[in-house]
Image (cartoon, rainbow, N blue to C red):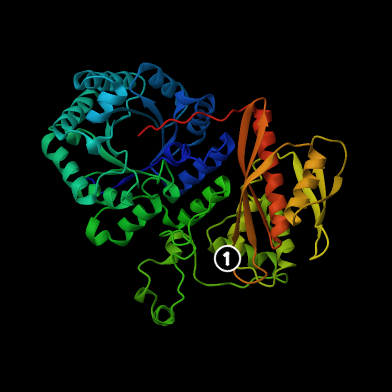
Amino acid sequence: MNNKVIIFDTTLRDGEQSPGFSMNIEEKLIFAEQLEKLGVDVIEAGFPVISDGDFEAVSAIAEKVKKAQVAGLARANNKDIEAAARALKNAVHPRIHTFISSSDIHIEYQLKKTREEVLRQAIEAVSYACSFIPNVEFSPMDATRSDRVYLAEMVSAVIEAGATTVNIPDTVGYTIPTEFYDLIKYLFDHVPNINKAVISVHCHNDLGLAVANSLAAIQAGARQVECTVNGIGERAGNTAMEELVMAIKTRNDLFNCYTEINTKQIMQTSKLLVNITGVSVQPNKAIVGDNAFAHESGIHQDGVLKHAMTYEIMRPEDIGITRSKLVLGKHSGRHAVLSRLKELGFELKPEEVDAFFAKFKCIADRKKEIYDEDLVAMIGEVLHKKEQNWRYVVKNIQISTGMFSPPMALVTLRDNQSDTEAIFEVAHGNGGVDAGVNAVKKMTGTKANIKAFNLVAITGGSDALCEVSVTVEEEVNGNVIKVFGNGMSIDVSIAGIMSFVDALNKIEYVKSAGHSQKSKSDGV
């Protein structure tokens, strides 16, 4: 049996369709490029038939990505399959992923069909998909609650029809590791043609067992795992890519298999997803959480200082971070800063250096020490937002507040759609952020409102660099546009105002591109 585990990343499909994680096409392209740099084998780029936005995103990613396979999801019907084939027409390595439910509860209450009808539809769908693209994956949705004999019959039939990969989804996160191991083993023992296809798994995390179930399936013979960065996805999420990959790498003695993931890109990929979506990772999240390699206990600190392996089973360098705290400040030159960035896994293009270093100097002038976490945050702030041609650019913010005087903010903006060099406005508010937002509203005329405000201190101390993420909504022609904005500064109020302007720029982008929020569909 091949000992390579294929990593099928569905962050841009299953992950992106979960509440709070929507991305526009440009953001999806940026993330797809990072996934290819990470080394994933398959990128499930979206569900082409479900909306024009998804179709365009899958098409754009299919044309952009050269090394990884690009998959489009399709229900087991001709319309979905044709849409996926059209969206993937320019892909170097295309894959159609089609699915239909196999559990009696879905067949009876959702599909309102018989087992025989569903089996026939699955076979016809795989055959039809193979007429467009030979690389076809099939998923019997809700497999872990299906009758095993019927499931084995379906798996055998779709392989005979041409499926090169058969995915066994734990769609509702119902199974447990020993049970899932037995199910995968049962299929290997009872499907006579099973060696003609790669057996895959797609586990949801409703009981917190997605990674454990996926690892159990690998032990039973599965050789593809469908997963997402940071474990995002429907409801409680999916198998976390970084946890699965590092479990295989760390316990290679047990699993005796490997992936082709460049683990040094794991942290950068995780941070990029947070920067794009505005949704932070919990501090105690395995592998990529802020505390994953932190030690506060005196006993632990003593052990780690003497030998890291006493309390660390993985090297932080292996996922793209370091325990060392290189102190950088306003007197640091470009060489020192760029050298540290390179050690952290970031290579800047010549045209990116000036923008990054200007941001570095601006922060360093106000902050005594710049840590690795600060550098990573600045990378996200400067580089990953440059892809957009934003309308509004913040030129200056001045805030006046006190215990007995109403907060007041003066904000200066440049409107790239105006001939005026800069405009400014002064406004009062209930706090520094509220005053600044009111000033921005006066200048732009926007009706957008902040619905959620999240503050994260990137580093410790009273001079901590902080990042603010906001959820902003605006009603346009009866439709609500919902976006996420990010801002970073030592001053919380400035970061909040910057995040609101960032959100306004994204709203302007949505308006200009004519995109509407896509409808959601569960899929597998």
Res 498 visible: yes
Q: Answer whether residue 415 is visible to the viewer in this image.
A: no
- Residue 131 pos. (x, y %): 33, 18
Where is residue 517, by image quadrant?
A: top right
Going 39% across and 75% down the picture, which residue do you hit?
308
Residue at position x 56%, y 34% from top?
Answer: 25
Residue 146 image point, x, y percent: 21, 34
* Image quarter in which the N terminus is found: top left
Give left or right: position of 11 versus 202: right
Between 164 and 475, the one lying in front of the other is 475
Q: Quadrant of the C terminus?
A: top left
Between 57 and 76, the one nearer to me in the picture: 76
Q: Would you say 115 lies left or right of 33 here?
A: left
The residue at the point 80 percent across, 47 percent down is 439
Identify the residue under disc 1.
372
**Quarter of the image holding residue 186?**
top left
Q: Nearer the viewer, residue 372 or 471?
A: 471
Name the residue type under label 1: Asp
Q: Nearer the viewer, residue 456 or 153?
A: 456
Across the whole image, how many numbered discs are drawn on residues?
Answer: 1
> As drawn, which residue projects farthest toward the front?
404
Classify residue 86 by image quadrant: top left
Q: Position of residue 382 (x, y in %)?
A: 66, 52
Disc 1 packing (10 Å; few <14; some 14–19; many ≥20)? many
